[in-house]
Image (cartoon, helix red, strand yellow):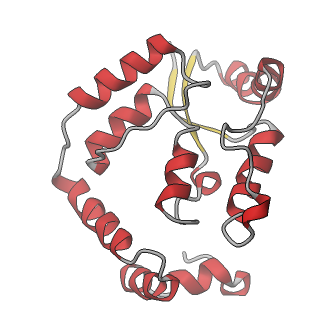
């Protein structure tokens, strides 16, 4: 059996992308806020997005099981405030994410979308989250950085200055395409 443990779900149905775009647009124009219940995505849309992409690639490569996570760039946790990120996170729940949130990030908030997580899975997610200890070690630096980022609140300039102390030039590269990616 071949298991791909780090697959990214890169072909999410278009309504999810439109919902996220509306959510981030609402940060400056509240009238553009999307339905807080989340996007409406049919089972057929999800099936099609998987069958014509990820499942096809799995078949071609002989992969039996893939553990999917969302695209990090699509998640864009750095956009908005805590409430924005918490709402976005509520749309992305599974056992792996619950375990990693505790193990690597020392998370103490678990949110789940009531219409997207089946009750039995929700029970398993809660149990996993509560029983998973924080590993510390190499993850402690990130936890400290997350706290420092949160301390900057909505002061974008202070946050940019702080991020530049972590990775010099990161905010310029993130906002100016001519700066290019670092090698």
Vertical relation: 78 (above or below) 41: below
* Tag count: 0
Residue situated in front as seen by the camera: 72 or 181: 72
Location of residue 141 by image quarter: bottom left
Residue displayed at 47% across by 83% down = 155
Vertical relation: 100 (above or below) 154: above
Q: Is 114 placed left or right of 152 in the picture? A: right
Whether residue 180 can be seen here? no
Residue displayed at 46% across by 16% down = 121
Question: Farthest front residue?
Answer: 31
Residue displayed at 42% across by 30% down = 96
Vertical relation: 143 (above or below) 112: below
Q: How far from the left and from the top, in percent, is residue 30?
A: 72, 64
Q: How far from the left and from the top, in percent, is residue 181?
A: 61, 76
Q: How far from the left and from the top, in percent, is residue 3?
A: 50, 22
Q: Is 40 placed left or right of 67 in the picture? A: right
Q: Is 3 placed left or right of 98 in the picture? A: right
Whether residue 103 can be seen here? yes
Residue situated in front as seen by the camera: 60 or 159: 159
Residue situated in front as seen by the camera: 93 or 35: 35
Vertical relation: 16 (above or below) 168: above
* Image quadrant containing the C terminus: bottom right
Q: How far from the left and from the top, in percent, is residue 164?
A: 44, 85
Residue displayed at 73% across by 56% down = 33
């Amino acid at each position: 059996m071949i298991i791909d443990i780090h697959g990214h779900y890169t072909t999410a149905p278009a309504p999810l992308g439109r919902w996220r775009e509306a959510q981030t647009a609402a940060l400056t124009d509240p009238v553009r806020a999307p339905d807080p219940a989340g996007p409406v995505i049919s089972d057929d849309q999800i099936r099609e997005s998987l069958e014509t992409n990820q499942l096809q690639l799995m078949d071609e490569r002989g992969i039996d099981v893939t553990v999917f996570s969302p695209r990090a760039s699509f998640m864009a946790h750095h956009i908005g405030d805590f409430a924005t990120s918490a709402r976005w996170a509520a749309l992305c729940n599974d056992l792996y994410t619950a375990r990693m949130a505790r193990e690597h990030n020392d998370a103490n908030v678990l949110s789940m979308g009531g219409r997207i997580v089946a009750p039995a899975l929700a029970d398993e997610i809660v149990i996993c989250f509560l029983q998973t200890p924080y590993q510390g070690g190499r993850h402690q630096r990130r936890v400290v950085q997350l706290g420092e980022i949160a301390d900057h609140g909505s002061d974008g300039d202070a946050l940019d200055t702080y991020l530049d102390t972590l990775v010099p030039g990161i905010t310029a590269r993130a906002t100016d395409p001519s700066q290019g990616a670092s090698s």
